[in-house]
């Protein structure tokens, strides 16, 4: 949105439309500190759908902002996504902080606000100094700019981790930032092992592809054919392996209050079955896309059944070893593992001023990783995985292309970016470029891998902070490298 920002002086002009007028009134109401005025504004100027979320909650947020930041001055105003939205850059006199407030009109009630979002921002003068320029054919310039931007994100407290950039399978940049352990002030380094959350799905998908390549399985096979003892055969006969791979099976997500409450008791893939085996499908298989961690637990069970091996043993021998990934595994929380990063998460609740410090994420970590996610790797190992994949060391060319090519649009799009799901890999279209890869996110964890399908760049960003620490940075780097 930086390209839409107006000069500071423009913020002093009269509002150009309804949404900007209401946004400015919202700021004025916050500045009064008057709870009755704040409640009145919410009641009269928020849409009915927004108010249903709870007037008291919205009002407590306004009280928090006034108490901790005080009088706000509007420094800049600009469109947010389209003319129904607006972004205000605010300066807090009390705390000397900069904040970004975004809001938009509710489509159902075009004269009412659809709530708002607020978070920390930078001094506009500093931010403009860090607008990404166009990349060039000079790789030295490009890498220096990436390093400058990552260092800045680290300085702002937005990033901690490792960034690796390669071109034509040659590493151009590999650098660590921040701390792997804040208690003992242990810095991250390029050999630090990070929790990668859902990135493990790529390894599971490769294992399935290998079984297809070996003639033990077809993508069109039903789950019932492979697991005739699946607890709910009526579901198993309707779902195919392909649908499990590309999240069109209709299976839901085993990550819920029940699994979280007992997260340290699940050690084998089979132990997860009672959490979901009797659940109904959320939609007709193949009719829509919905991200499913459950589907990848089931795929792990398929790997075990057809290979005759424990899932974790199979992945170590047939994926990690083949790719030369010697620092990757699904470790149990009780294991002593060198060079392991601790994750740091933002506490829940409304805290846009970031008054509460990050905390260790150990309370949110399961006993060990699964076929759906939660393992650990290094940036170097993940690069070796990408090289092995591109050089057809893990799968032959035909099956590799099948896995990487997008089949179903996910709806996870942004301006100029459309994302499709392949088999265990997302196929992101940025302009004319197809980018294969996967990300991962959980409390205190955010990771991303992007492989440019023309064979040029590979981008790996691993972080021991919450999203969007890695995903946001990875996307910015990709856009920069494509913007010439």
Image (cartoon, rainbow, N blue to C red):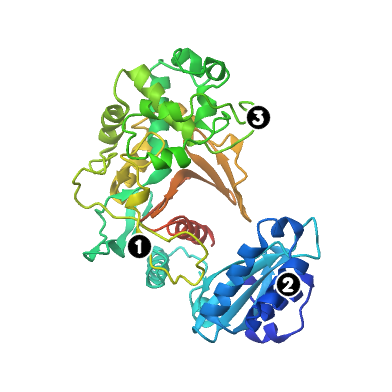
Question: Which image quadrant for residue 210?
Answer: top left
User: Mark 2 against mark 3, which lies toward the viewer?
Assistant: 2
Q: Is residue 25 visible?
A: yes
Give the mark nearest the N terminus, 2 or 3. 2
Query: Which residue occupies 78% across, 57% down?
Result: 107
Helix, strand or loop for disc 3: loop
Q: Residue 115, image x and y in percent?
A: 67, 63
Q: CA distance from mark 1 to mark 2?
A: 40 Å
Q: Residue 427 vs residue 26: left or right?
A: left
**Quadrant into which the C terminus falls:** bottom right
Query: Which residue occupies 31% across, 33% down?
Result: 267
Residue 2 position (above or below residue 254): below
Would you call the spot at circle 2 few (<14 residues within 10 Å), some (14-19), or many (20 or more)?
some
Give the mark nearest the N terminus, 3 or 1. 1
In this figure, which residue is indicated by the disc labeled 2? 41
On residue 287, which mark appears?
3
Residue 189 position (above or below residue 156): above
Q: Residue 153 vs residue 14: left or right?
A: left
Q: Residue 431, image x and y in percent?
A: 60, 52
Q: Residue 12, image x and y in percent?
A: 70, 86
Q: Residue 411 vs residue 384: left or right?
A: right
- C-beta proximity under 8 Å, tags 2 and 3: no
Task: Work out whether residue 302 or residue 270 is closer to the camera in this orientation and state it.
Answer: 270
**Quadrant into which the N terminus falls:** bottom right
Q: CA distance from mark 3 to mark 1?
A: 39 Å
Q: CA distance from mark 2 to mark 3?
A: 42 Å
Helix, strand or loop for disc 1: loop
Helix, strand or loop for disc 2: helix
Give the mark nearest the N terminus, 1 or 2. 2
In this figure, which residue is indicated by the disc labeled 1? 160
- C-beta proximity under 8 Å, tags 1 and 2: no
């Amino acid at each position: 949105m930086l390209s839409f920002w107006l000069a500071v002086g423009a913020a002093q002009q009269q509002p150009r439309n309804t949404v900007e007028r209401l946004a400015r009134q919202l700021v004025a109401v916050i500045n009064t500190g008057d709870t009755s005025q704040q409640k009145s504004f919410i009641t009269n100027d928020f849409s009915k759908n927004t108010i249903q979320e709870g007037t008291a909650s919205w009002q407590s947020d306004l009280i928090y902002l006034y108490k901790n930041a005080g009088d706000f001055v509007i420094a800049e105003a600009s469109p947010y996504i389209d003319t129904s939205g607006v972004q205000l850059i605010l300066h807090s006199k009390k705390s000397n902080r900069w904040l970004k407030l975004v809001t938009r009109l509710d489509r159902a009630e075009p004269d009412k606000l659809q709530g708002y979002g607020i978070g920390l921002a930078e001094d506009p003068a500093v931010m403009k100094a860090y607008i990404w320029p166009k990349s060039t054919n000079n790789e030295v310039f490009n890498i220096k700019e990436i390093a400058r931007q990552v260092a800045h994100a680290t300085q702002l407290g937005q990033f901690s981790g490792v960034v690796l950039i390669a071109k034509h399978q040659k590493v151009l940049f590999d650098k660590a930032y921040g701390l792997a352990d804040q208690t003992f002030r242990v810095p991250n380094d390029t050999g630090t092992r990070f929790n990668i959350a859902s990135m493990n799905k790529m390894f599971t998908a490769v294992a399935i592809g290998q079984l297809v390549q070996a003639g033990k399985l077809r993508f069109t096979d039903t789950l019932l054919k492979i697991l005739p003892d699946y607890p709910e055969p009526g579901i198993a006969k309707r779902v195919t392996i392909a649908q499990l791979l590309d999240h069109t099976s209709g299976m839901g997500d085993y990550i819920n209050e029940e699994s979280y409450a007992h997260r340290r008791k699940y050690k084998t893939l089979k132990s997860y079955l009672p959490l979901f085996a009797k659940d109904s499908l959320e939609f007709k298989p193949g009719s829509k896309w919905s991200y499913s961690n459950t589907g990848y637990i089931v795929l792990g069970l398929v790997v075990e059944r057809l290979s005759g091996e424990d899932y974790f043993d199979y992945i170590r021998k047939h994926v990690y070893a083949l790719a030369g990934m010697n620092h990757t595994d699904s470790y149990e929380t009780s294991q002593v593992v060198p060079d392991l990063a601790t994750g740091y998460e933002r506490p829940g609740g409304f805290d846009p001023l970031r008054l509460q410090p990050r905390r260790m994420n150990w309370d949110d970590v399961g006993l060990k990783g699964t076929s759906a996610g939660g393992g650990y790797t290094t940036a170097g190992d993940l690069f070796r995985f990408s090289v092995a994949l591109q050089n057809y060391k893990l799968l032959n060319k035909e099956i590799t292309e099948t896995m990487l090519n997008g089949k179903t649009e996910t709806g996870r799009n942004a301006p100029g970016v459309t994302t499709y799901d392949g088999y265990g890999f997302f196929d992101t279209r940025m302009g004319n470029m197809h980018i294969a890869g996967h990300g991962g996110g959980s409390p205190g964890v955010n990771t991303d891998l992007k492989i440019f399908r023309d064979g040029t760049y590979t981008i790996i960003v691993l972080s021991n902070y919450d999203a969007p620490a890695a995903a946001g940075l990875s996307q910015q780097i990709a856009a920069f490298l494509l913007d010439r």
